[in-house]
Image: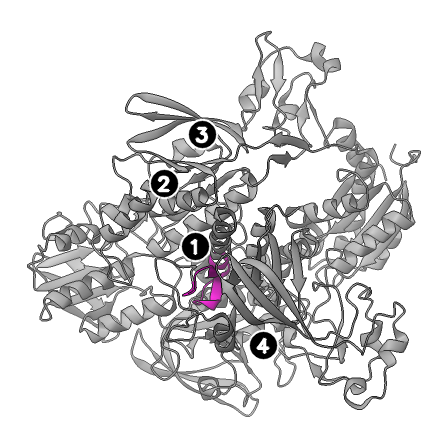
Amino acid sequence: MAKNSKSVIIIGAGIAGIQAALDLGDMGIKVYLIEKNPVIGGKMAQLDKTFPTLDCSICILAPKLSECYRHPNITLHTLSEVSNVEGTSGNFTVDIFKRARYVKEEVCTNCGDCASICPVRGVPNYFDANLKNMAAAYIPFPSAVPPVHIIDKNSCVYLNYGICGLCAKNCGAEAIDFSQKDETIKIDNVGSIIVAPGYGLLEDVSPLTRYGYGKYKNVVTALEFERLICASGPLEGHLKRLSDGNEPKKLAFLQCIGSRSDRDQKYCSSICCMYTTKAAMIAYEHNNELESYVFYIDMRAGGKGFQNFLRRGANEYEIKYIKSKISHIEVDEEESPIITYEDYDTSVIKQMKVDLVILATCIIPSPGIEKLADVLGIELNDYKFIKTHPFLPVETSVEGIFTCGCAREPMDIPRSVAEASGAAARAAEVIKGG
Amino acid sequence: MSEKKDKDVRVGVFVCSCGSNIGGLIDVKEVAEYAKSLPNVVFTQDNLYTCSETGLAQIKKGVTEHNLNRVVVASCTPRTHEPLFRETIKDVGLNEYLFQFVNIRDQCTWVHMKYPHEALEKAKEVIRMGVAKVSKLEALENIVVDATPTAMVIGGGVSGITSALSLANQGFETHLVEKDAQLGGKLNVLNKLFPTGQDASELLESLKERVKNNSNLTVYTSAKVTNIEGFVGNYEVEVQQNGKTTNLKIGVIVVAVGASLLTPTGKFGYDGKKRITQYELEEKLKNNDVKANNIVMIQCVGARNDERKYCSNVCCMSALKNALLIKEKNPDANITILFRDLYTPGTLYEEYYRRAREAGVIFLSYKLEKEPIVEENTIKVYNEYIGEEISVPYDLLVLSTPLIANDGNKELAQMLKVPLEENKFFLEAHVKLRPMDFATDGVFICGAAKWPVDITESITQGYAAAGRASTIISHDTIEVEGATSFLPDYNRDLCTGCEVCINVCPYKAISKNEDDEIVITQVLCKGCGVCGATCTNHAIIIRHFTDEQILSEIYAFGGS
């Protein structure tokens, strides 16, 4: 079906990489979609709902995951990273380092028998923000693509000590293959490359500990909150405090955690004002008696329908917005967080006791971006995002290599999707224009 | 009626748990078990996620092993998932139209989440209706039409030019139509561009140069699109230029008509001299004509209020840019920006805000409820932070007004049969995942015609619309939905020629031929069913929604 002899390599299969892959595939161009995780979907798959439509995130994403999986022009390589690039625009040769899955992709029926018999428990599931444990044989979430289990090399008893192997014995399809080795796949005749590795989130670093994260159980990050409130998450959508399992009645959402600050990241993380409002709305839908307070500096809502969304938040969901700056957080004897803040409207220092604090942590460059930039020979900017020119927004510093989404700057899903289609167009210009 | 078994009809019903979205409230096993008792049903199964690759594999297995020739999926919503399930049964050799979607999530477990018993009973009833209907469905074929590999971009601003260049560079014959005598849109108005400080004219010249050198690109300036007929891959577009009419055969259309500037007549003493808009300031800066020493800027003038609820996206950055330009020339100038929420998202823009503060620009916030009061030479603004009213002297007041939708949007929208949203900007197919598409196939949108955007995003969207448009014209043919309305020959006698159908059809799919007979152009029809519903003599039939099929559902509902 692919009508062109040159292919495109897309690095990263989050929503941006997926959209670029589907567009190019639909243009009749052969695409290799490279994802370092065992399944595709990126951060969007982890979200509960999306703003401003409150669509269920995985519900609108899942058809795209399937489309990628079955598209005749798209070849998916999961557990894979680009390890070497040679050549120039129109004719790159790319090495893909593919880690062993220890499960035969074409044989596995995704029945889950390996996971249920695996004696290793307590492997934190990254997909559930490490709030839920799984076995050493696992699939991050049930509707994942590819629908193939994986064996975690670090915690599998067989791979480390040569004993057990229960999963292999229990697998009716005989899909377990401990002899699989990491491999390097060479792809040549690559016309163009799109770099879409997405973003990381601030974790375990000083701005978070300042707000008691890691120390107080009732202080969670926004991504953790997404999983906690999601019907397919670790609490099946029944929001509870992690300290005592009680249902919280009063939530505090703290904005700009680690961003817009001289001490931490100087830039604005762009999406937090909106996702916070969304999260507070969902929480309210779960429990109409719940109160939500948003502590913010500037409400940044410039996208389509965003101001209406904020109005709805305030009017229909009773979200209270407090223009303020947080000083610090302590807890009382019941481990309820007490926030000390300066109210900007009155310039008075105040305190508020809540049941649960949610930190809008800053988007940071994708972990591993420096190594990837090195392999590709592309430049990063001062913040370690991929460097682009404001008026050449999807081009990297290397001709024929394009970028899209949060790899170059924090941005929301519509913009990532638009940039992905834009990067696809630019790659198509290289392929078709010769 | 629905109790009777139809010979050779073998229905499979797949009930989705949707994680706990459905299964958390009602027992999907019980629902699947119930479905087994329905006429023509030979196989049922419940799945954790029917839409997952595992669930889809189970549908395929069910079809093959149980020789199913009709499939019902009871799950979330056809809005997002119907194409996926249709595609799945097609993969195992079934006609994709022998499929019925039953909504037991949005319309059962979500809306009735406080009433699990009633939700369960409703789920069973809608499945019973779905099974009755699927038993009556007929195989249909999609319509295949040729596609012309040409593109038209309407609007020659930065977004439109970018889009046209990308399409032309991909090898497509592209036509760019601009209403003004010059290409460039707002680039002609602007002085310098944020965040680089580059001259707007410099960017425009480089774009024009690339347009001139592109042999696939034809430009029509001082031109207007006056008529659009046809459908995806096959549009007939009439362009008027200097009294000359050109008719073009076009495969895809990109709308890039941009937005207009709001003149704040009657607001804050606007007079176009001492009290001007941010865009008028651009002109002054271009001419090196800013003499004032005390400058005050007010943000959100005519935006984020009850009349115009939205944030215009670009005004904070424009104000910062112009403030910095003035400071560069005249470091002693006093510049105060009165703002509500400063909108500088991302890396470079936040950096810009920082630079403005470091340059000594003063920022004072105000609230919508307490707007600044403009007097002859001073502005009074209530500052929440110190809890007092402050008087700021000025000799130049600059009002940041929003971008607003063009007056001409309505006319163009009607020609293209695409919708506008409440502020009269163009409305895309889905805000989140289809930002450049319209619901109408073959028409795309980019730039400020959709929503206020800056130059960077206009460029991105220009490329993006080109990417989306290319997915269609990269192929020689296009498949369109086969579930359309038609007037069968055996019903010709019933047609009285009253033309009600012609008037109600929103897609201009129905007309009369030279013999005064009703003709329905299948590729134009979207199967909405309005013609069939209004046809006084039931002459028009809607495929996939025939009277018999719909009645079977109603009987199944009432007749249990």
> Which region of the structure is painted magenta?
A396-416
Q: Which amino acid, mark 2?
A: Val
Q: Locate residue B39 relative to residue A196 in the image: left or right.
A: right
Callout 1 crowding tier (Cα within 10 Å): few <14, some 14–19, many ≥20 = some
State the separation of the CA atoms marked 2 and 4. 49 Å
The chain identifier of the residue carrying mark 4 reads A
Residue on which the image places disc 1: A308
Q: Locate residue A159 relative to residue B9 in the image: left or right.
A: left
The image position of residue B341, as x and y in percent, is 32, 65
The chain identifier of the residue carrying mark 1 reads A
Which residue is drawn at the image coordinates 85% and 77% (left, top)?
A167
Q: Secondary structure at mark 4?
A: loop
Residue on which the image places disc 3: B415
Q: Which amino acid, mark 3?
A: Met
Q: Earlier in the sequence, mark 4 or mark 1?
A: 4
Q: Are marks 3 and 2 in contact (CB under 8 Å)?
A: no
The image shows residue B559, relative to residue A176, as above or below, that is: above
Residue on which the image places disc 4: A248
The image shows residue A236, relative to residue B182, as above or below, that is: below
State the separation of the CA atoms marked 3 and 4. 53 Å
Q: Is residue A402 magenta?
A: yes
Q: Secondary structure at mark 2?
A: loop
Q: For residue A383, what is the image quadrant?
A: bottom left
Q: Locate residue A154 relative to residue A295 in the image: left or right.
A: right
The image position of residue A308, as x and y in percent, is 43, 54
Disc 4 with disc 1 on a shared chain: yes
State the separation of the CA atoms marked 2 and 1. 24 Å
